[in-house]
Amino acid sequence: MYLTKSFIPILKNNPSEAKIKSHQLMLRVGMIKQSSAGIYSWLPLGFKIMKKIEQIVREEQNKIGVQEILMPTIQSSEIWKESGRYDDYGEEMLRIKDRQDREMLYGPTNEELVTDIFRASVKSYKSLPQLLYHIQWKFRDEVRPRFGIMRCREFYMKDAYSFDISDEEAFFSYNKFFLSYLRTFKRLDLTAIPMAADTGPIGGNLSHEFIILADTGESKIYTDKEIFKVNSDDTKVEKKSLEELRTKYENFYAVTDEKFNKKEFEDKVSEKNRLITKGIEVGHIFYFGDKYSKPMGASVDLPGGKKDFVKMGSYGVGVSRLVGAIIEAKYDDKKEVMKWPISIAPYELSIIPMINKNDNSALEKANYIYNELIKNNIETIIDDTDENLSSKIKKMNLIGAPFQIIIGKQAEGDLLEFKETGQESKKLKLEEVIKIIKKEKAKN
Ligand code: ATP
Ligand code: MG
């Protein structure tokens, strides 16, 4: 991509309306544009990143055998009346009337809709478990939308639903998602801690929030530092192995303020291991048994001829919130340097040539390198504007490709000035640069 041809509306300064660094950066480099309170358009740079996050989330769902569907954003109120949540959900639900005066709504979540889909066609225990997911826009009319896309009204979410024959099987499904979330966040280069949580309006009795640490997070968290040492790399998607993994996490104290108990914290965690900080909720999983299947009549035939209501869970990841959460975790706002993890970077490398009016050689060299990188499937952006070198570097530090090639005065022969964004530069040949980037990409 040539910067002059791109749609990346960069601001010279930080927008004053933004209070946290992710919101600042996203407006600054034109990743998003607010259209009304808590509702945003996603511009090319932001959208590219979100799509890459979505793809990683999707791949990790597919790996544990969840099947993708797509449900509409607009739902009928009928199913919500069946489950009893139409009145309970309150003002967060955006209610709409169609031209026939039918009560419709913009889905804040999809338990009812997916239960309706399930009950229409699954009749026997033989078809269980069923694990379904979709990645879709949701709308919640939050009282105080704020922090840009971190707490907005229309947001992009992966939501999955499990249907099982018994509690035991349902816990197995729950634990599959538990592992899948750890793997997903790891690929996004985030350390997410699973914390026992309250179930809120989704209801039920078992629930974990996945929280990443960030000073600007909305959740206050209390945890044992030792929890960071739990490793899930060797966990197999088998009942025993998954149970052991969840137990390993649950043995450490880790809660948000909703569940905090001072005495318990101090009894369980030695003073030196106590960590009290803030975090961002990026995922949330729930087990709620027959809370929806019973009122909505979603039952299956059991082996002995009897029928029973299926046991369900739901599993959300805030795909759009993750864009902001990753910025909160990675952006150095003092130095104004963002370095996206290569797995989701909008560009993998930026070329920054110093362009003189009377001398085309730097731009020619940049073009040559650009074409070589593209041939090697390295996503590259080239700053072909005629600004000075230092303001170009500043801009590219904000856009956040993890690697840079600078073509300035120091360029000599076939050695290039190559940098990991924000670090010192090195002199390398183009072939070496390509090798380094390919190796980084292969890690994912
Ligand atoms: P929160 O506690 O942050 O309000 P929630 O518990 O209501 O979230 P869930 O129903 O668990 O949200 O939704 C799953 C995920 O969707 C959350 O973990 C979060 O990442 C994301 N999410 C929820 N509400 C919003 C929002 N208003 N804006 C952006 N993302 C959101
Ligand atoms: Mg939640």
Image (cartoon, rainbow, N blue to C red):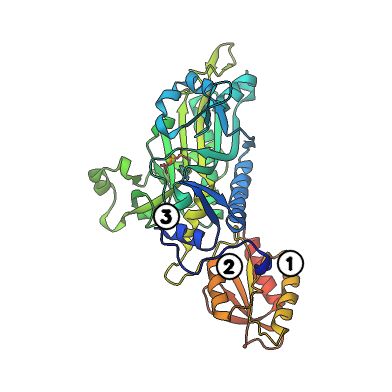
**Viewer-nearest of labels 3 and 2?**
2
- Front-most of residues 347 and 5: 5
Q: Of residues 66 and 138, which is closer to you in this image?
A: 138
Disc 3 designates what residue? 228
Secondary structure under tag 3 reads helix
Q: Residues within 10 Å of mark 2 (few under 14, many from 20)?
A: many
* Residue 66 to residue 427: above or below: above
Q: Quadrant of residue 263?
A: top left
**Which numbered disc covers residue 383?**
none
Q: Is residue 271 left or right of residue 17?
A: left
Q: Mark 1 to mark 3: distance in Å?
A: 38 Å
> Where does the image place residue 325, in percent across and percent down from the top left?
47, 54
Residue 52 in the image, given as x and y percentages of width and height? 62, 53
Give the label, 1 or 3, closer to the camera.
1
Alpha carbon distance from label 2 to label 1 = 16 Å
Ligand 1 is within 8 Å of the C-beta of the residue at disc 3: no
Which residue appears farthest toward the front when viewing the image? 99
Q: Residues within 10 Å of mark 3 (few under 14, many from 20)?
A: few
Residue located beneath label 1 in the image: 374
The residue that label 2 is drawn on is 402
Q: Secondary structure at mark 1?
A: helix
> Residue 44 placed where, x, y %?
62, 56
Left or right relative to 74: residue 90: left
* Amino acid residing under circle 2: Pro
